[in-house]
Image: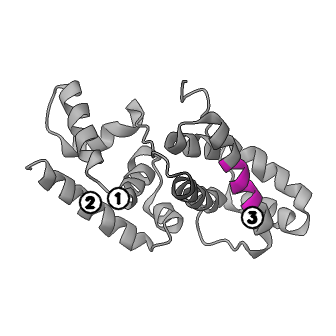
Amino acid sequence: MKLKSYIQPIDNPVNIQTEEALISAAQDNPKAFKKLYERYYGAIFGFVFKRINDKDSTADITQQVFLNALTNIKKYKHKGVPFSAYLYRIAINECNGFFRKMNNTRYLVVDEECKNSLIDELIPSDDHDVKMNQLIELLKKLDVKEIQLLELRFFENHPFKEVGYILNISENLAKVKTYRLLSKMKKMLGR
């Protein structure tokens, strides 16, 4: 199963005013939520698939994410991050619930493009295979919250403000936790 075939990036980012107009329309009329759904479905599906690694379960969880978002759209308030951050937050909670309920294995998909900045930051080697093997071993030693932080920041390339929002922490705490985690990982590697 190829991951790339399931991941669809968010089409042409809209400006904040346009996004707020879409959200406001959805708050007034649930049928207007369709535009938000169509805009973000592919990105949220890919995000969930990277963690679940099962197409059917991913589709179910993604649908639940959007159902939760639609159900709570009237409570949504803009907090300086894109609406997608709200959806990612729901997706993380749904994935965590899936793992608790199913007592299932959590997957971590590391794309070539995504891991380069993290791997170059941590592992001083010219041998790509050595770097990859060291990264895999290192990731096995981290807890779920640490991996979520790395995924959001390095594999999903979210800015710290969005990482903080998705994980329900401040932007500054997201930065501090990231730099502390990188420092911890370097120590684990003996650097």
Residue type at tag 1: Glu
Q: Earlier in the sequence, mark 3 or mark 1?
A: 3
Which residue is at a point 80% across and 62% down the rendered structure image?
Answer: 21
User: Residue 116 sits in which quadrant?
Assistant: top left
Residue type at tag 3: Glu
Image height of 60 relative to 55, above or below: below
> Whole-percent x and y of residue 145?
39, 61
- In depth, the one of 62 and 31 nearer the eye is 62
* Residue that carries the numbered disc 1 in the rendered image: 146
Of all residues shown, which one is farthest toward the left?
Answer: 190
Which residue is at a point 50% across and 52% down the rendered structure image?
Answer: 103
User: Residue 160 sits in which quadrant?
Assistant: bottom left
Q: Is residue 35 magenta?
A: no
Please state which of the two labelled residues, at mark 2 or mark 1, is closer to the viewer. Answer: 1
Label 1 secondary element: helix
Which residue is at a point 57% across and 54% down the rendered structure image?
Answer: 98
Q: Which residues are magenta?
A: 61-68
Instruction: State whether residue 11 appears in this view.
Output: no
- In depth, the one of 14 and 177 nearer the eye is 177
* Residue that carries the numbered disc 3 in the rendered image: 20
> Whole-percent x and y of residue 53?
53, 37
Left or right for 49, reference 117? right
Which numbered tag is attached to residue 25? Answer: none
Which numbered tag is attached to residue 181? Answer: 2
Left or right for 15, reference 180? right
